[in-house]
């Protein structure tokens, strides 16, 4: 089982896509990954002149290649779609590749012949998805999360700022009252230390992912002769 979010980009989504294409894993998380399927190369302009030492003339970053899955689809723009979607704030907080300026569009090429191990069948995915959706629908925590998602979407959609000091203060006070800024900060990757040990946080979103894994293991166990 591979956990993904909108923060999953480049190599991590290539891995998720490969595991999905070969039928070797269940992909769980946000509706899709970030969507970066391109390769860049940095060219030092000063080094092109042959001078020693080379002058500092800046650099160019060029997109030179694009990744494609064995099914022919690129991970560019649309990313890798999850088999089971678990609602989360990361879907709104993270900016997808397709929403960035000058992003390359999705495209596809001819698929190549590859093995389908079918360790995660479509029928199994459907059963696990139905159970997860039923739990999410009955959860008060996820109901509250749905409201928070709508608030964050409304914030991101703002294109203006009140010129009235009173109105601006009221808006800022309202934003502070819902305490979403603290929750968003918790979602962002910790860049303070590269040696920080990974630890799955105890919250209702991760608890649902563990429930999906429990269902998955029980299904696999019952299917074993």
Image (cartoon, helix red, strand yellow):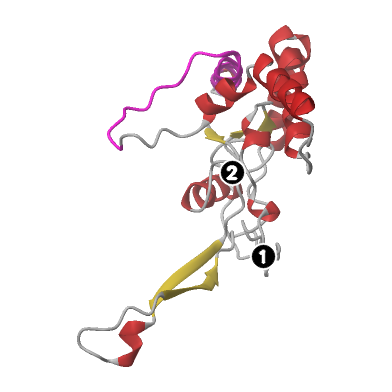
- Look at the image and tell me whether residue 182 can be seen: yes
Q: Residue at x 46, y 34 (%)?
A: 189
**On-image quarter of the C terminus:** top right
Q: Position of residue 140 (x, y in %)?
A: 73, 7
The residue indicated by pointer 2 is 23
Q: Residue at x 68, y 69 (%)?
A: 110
- Look at the image and tell me whether residue 83 can be seen: no
13 over 193 or under it: above or below: below
Q: Indicate left or right for 147 with 16 as reference.
A: right
Q: Indicate left or right for 146 with 34 as reference.
A: right
Q: Position of residue 39 (x, y in %)?
A: 50, 66
Mark 1, mark 2: which one is toward the viewer?
1
Q: How many marks?
A: 2
Look at the magenta stretch and give its main secondary structure.
Answer: helix
Is residue 210 covered in magenta?
yes
Q: Position of residue 150 (x, y in %)?
A: 78, 27
For mark 2, does the 10 Å Cα neighbourhood hold few (<14), some (14 to 19), or many (20 or more) residues? some
Q: Residue furthest front?
A: 165
Residue 102, disc: 1
Residue 149 found in image quarter = top right
Is residue 225 covered in magenta?
no
Residue 103 found in image quarter = bottom right
Q: Residue at x 71, y 23 (%)?
A: 169
Query: For numbered disc 1, what is the local secondary structure?
Result: loop
Q: Tell me which segment is drawn in magenta.
A: 194-221
For the residue pair 74 and 104, the one nearer the viewer reads as: 104
131 over 96 or under it: above or below: above
For the residue pair 221 and 105, the one nearer the viewer reads as: 105
Residue 134 found in image quarter = top right
């Amino acid at each position: 089982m591979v956990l993904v979010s909108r923060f999953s980009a480049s190599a991590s989504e290539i891995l998720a896509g490969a595991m999905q294409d070969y039928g070797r894993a269940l992909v769980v998380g946000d509706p899709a990954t970030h969507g970066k399927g391109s390769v860049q190369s940095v060219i030092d302009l000063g080094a092109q002149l042959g001078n020693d030492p080379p002058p500092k003339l800046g650099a160019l970053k060029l997109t030179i290649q694009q990744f494609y899955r064995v099914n022919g689809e690129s991970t560019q723009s649309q990313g890798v779609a999850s088999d089971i979607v678990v609602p989360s704030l990361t879907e709104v907080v993270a900016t997808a590749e397709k929403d960035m300026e000058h992003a390359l569009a999705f495209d596809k090429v001819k698929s190549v012949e590859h093995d389908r191990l079918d360790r995660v069948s479509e029928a199994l995915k459907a059963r696990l998805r139905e159970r997860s959706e039923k739990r999410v629908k009955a959860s008060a925590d996820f109901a509250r999360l749905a409201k928070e998602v709508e608030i964050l979407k409304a914030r991101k959609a703002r294109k203006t700022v009140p010129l009235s000091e009173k109105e601006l203060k009221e808006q800022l006070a309202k934003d502070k009252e819902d305490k979403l800024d603290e929750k968003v900060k918790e979602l962002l990757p910790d860049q303070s230390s590269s040696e920080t040990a990974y630890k799955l946080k105890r919250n209702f979103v991760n608890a649902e992912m563990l429930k999906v894994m429990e269902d998955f293991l029980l299904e696999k166990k019952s299917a074993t002769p």
